Amino acid sequence: MTPIPKTSSTSCIAPFENESQVIAMGSFQIENRLDRVSLTGDLDITKDKAGLEKAIALKALLDSVVQTLQKLHPPERIQVVPTTVVKNPFN
């Protein structure tokens, strides 16, 4: 997992381009997928400089997602295929 960068004007993921990027901010995670970007967990944006940095980084990431979607001219809805859990081959 890649920690989200501090105060960045660009996103550190390429939205909808791969299935391998996960960004973590504490227990909050942003997972890049080919058909979606998943946001899970909890994120506290506190009323201090640390909270401001988190908010700016999250905004940059979401701005990147919005810009990508606008360029793609997406359909009204897609059918999201649920993820499947596979057996760990190393066990």
Image (spheres, rainbow, N blue to C red):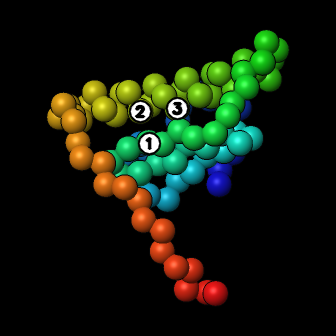
Please give the residue where the numbered disc 2 appears in the rendered image: 65
Judging depth in this view, the residue of 62 and 12 nearest the camera is 62
Element type at marker 3? helix
For marks 1 and 3, give the CA distance: 10 Å
Amino acid type, mark 2: Val
What residue is rendered at 63% in x and 22% in y? 56
Is 91 on the left-hand or right-hand side of 82? right
Q: Are marks 3 and 2 in contact (CB under 8 Å)?
A: yes
For marks 3 and 2, give the CA distance: 6 Å
7 is higher (above) or lower (below) than 88: above
Amino acid type, mark 3: Leu
Q: How far across and how far down the image is residue 89, in percent?
A: 55, 86
Camera-nearest label, 2 or 1:
1
Question: Is residue 17 visible in the rendered structure shown here?
Answer: no
What residue is rendered at 23% in x and 42% in y? 78
Q: How far across and how far down the image is residue 9, in percent?
A: 56, 26
36 is higher (above) or lower (below) than 72: below
Q: How far across and how far down the image is residue 69, in percent?
A: 31, 32
Q: Residue 37, which numbered label?
A: 1
